[in-house]
Structures are given as C-alpha cells and as structure tokens.
Image (spheres, rainbow, N blue to C red):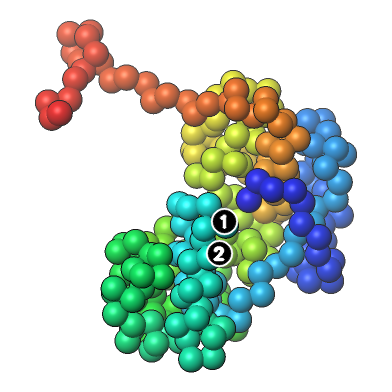
Amino acid sequence: MLGAPMTTDKLLLPFDHVAAHEHISRDDARMADVIARTGEFQFKLDECESVYESLLEAIAYQSISGKAAATIFGRIKALGANGICPTPEEILKARIPTLRKAGLSNAKALAMKDLAQKTIDGIVPTLEAARGMSDEELVERLISVRGIGAWTVEMFLIFRLGRPDVLPIHDLGVQKGWAITYRKRKMPKPKELLKFGERWRPYRTVASWYMWRAVGLAGKDARKITKARPKKKRAAGGKNQRSKSR
C-alpha cells in the first residue's frame, strides 16, 4: 500500500475525486501540500470476479512480501481446474498438505478452507450482493471468516468496491503518514486517528490514500516516526505495576 501512485481509468472511480480533493484540503494547509506534491487521487480497482476470490488472494498475501505472496497465490490458482482460481468446492477438496506444499502456512490453509465453506453457505456474499451492502454489514459478515480481520475487509472495500469513506485506523502506513503530514514524532493511536478523521468524511478513503503517499514523499525520514508507547499502569503504591505472569 505504500508504493508509487497507481494509474487508473478515472471512469472506474465511483465518486468525484476533484470534490474529494477540495473537501479534505479545505482549511488544511498540510493536506493541501501533500495533494499538491503527489498529484490527483488515482488508483486502479482490483479485478477479482468475486468476494471469495478477492479474500482468497488477501489470505495468501497476509504478512509476507508481495513477491513471495504472488508466487504462492500463483500455485494456489494452479490448483483450480480452469487454472485461474480454484472454486470453493475445489479448495474444500484440497488436502492440507497440498495447500502447505503450495507455500501456505497451516493457519492460512485453514483460513482458505473456512472462506470456501462460508462462501458455499452464503455468509460470504456475491460481488453483486456486496455492492448493495453497507460497509458495516460487510465488515461484520466477512470478519467471521477465519483469518480475515477488519483491515483485510477495509482493503476490500477500498480497492475492490471503491468505497469513498473508509479509514483503516489500524493501518501502519496511514498512521505513519498522518504523523508525517501533521509533524508528529509518534504515530497516533487508532482512536485518535478515528476522531481526527471525522473532518475528512465522506472521503476518508481519499485522505487515507494521501497518508500512504505522504510516507513515500518522506523517504528515509519516515523511519524516524515510531509507534506511541502505551502508558505504563501504576499500582496503588505508586510503583510500576508488574505482570504476575512471565
């Protein structure tokens, strides 16, 4: 998510990016500066043909480099009869050792099987049905899938459905970009970012995209931004409270 801006056919965007620029930079010189240095908002929507396929790919990409994930997902796709993407039924029939041999961890293999079963059961909606659901309903439905968290669903909402008002408050890139843009030494806590982001409604997706770009603009200086440390709890006697477990 922190790479260079991606090109797109503007007709694919389901909202007015010019209006979004004006809204999020109005009375905000720092955001206006990031926009001026980056250029107009642009990205290419993913082309996965189903919610199932999009999440299957997301599971493969979790917590590893993009290059390694692409290789692994290529092997997973090869398991399908059509060589494009295995159906839910094909994933359920695939043995865990087969999925492990493709490069998946045991947890990811089990997550893919749960995704397949929940797709068959109708819990994971079709792409057409998903377009008619609210962000909140989709998050609630999809996080029921093993291995799928709110962040993964938020990326689906942004990069597949093109929803304009998604703010991934737990995304480190967005947190770091915010700290860089607003000249902070520490990344904000999720609740702080959520509160601040209210000013960007109804275009929080666009603001998030510029936070990712801000990290790229900062270059090596982005490394100076660190996560805020949680405050240490103090016992009644005034000393730092220590955990009993080790």
Q: Position of residue 100 (x, y in %)?
A: 34, 68
Residue bearing mark 1: 66
Q: Residue furthest front?
A: 101
Tally the numbered discs.
Answer: 2
Q: Position of residue 210 (x, y in %)?
A: 73, 44
Left or right of residue 205: residue 169: left
Structural distance between the alpha carbons of marks 1 and 2: 6 Å
Q: Are marks 1 and 2 in contact (CB under 8 Å)?
A: yes
Quadrant holding the C terminus:
top left
Q: Amino acid at mark 2?
A: Ala
Label 1 SS: helix
Q: Nearer the viewer, residue 112 or 214?
A: 112
Instruction: Give the answer, above or below, for where 20 lies relative to 80.
Output: above
Residue bearing mark 2: 70
Q: Position of residue 235 (x, y in %)?
A: 20, 15
Rendered image: mark on residue 186:
none
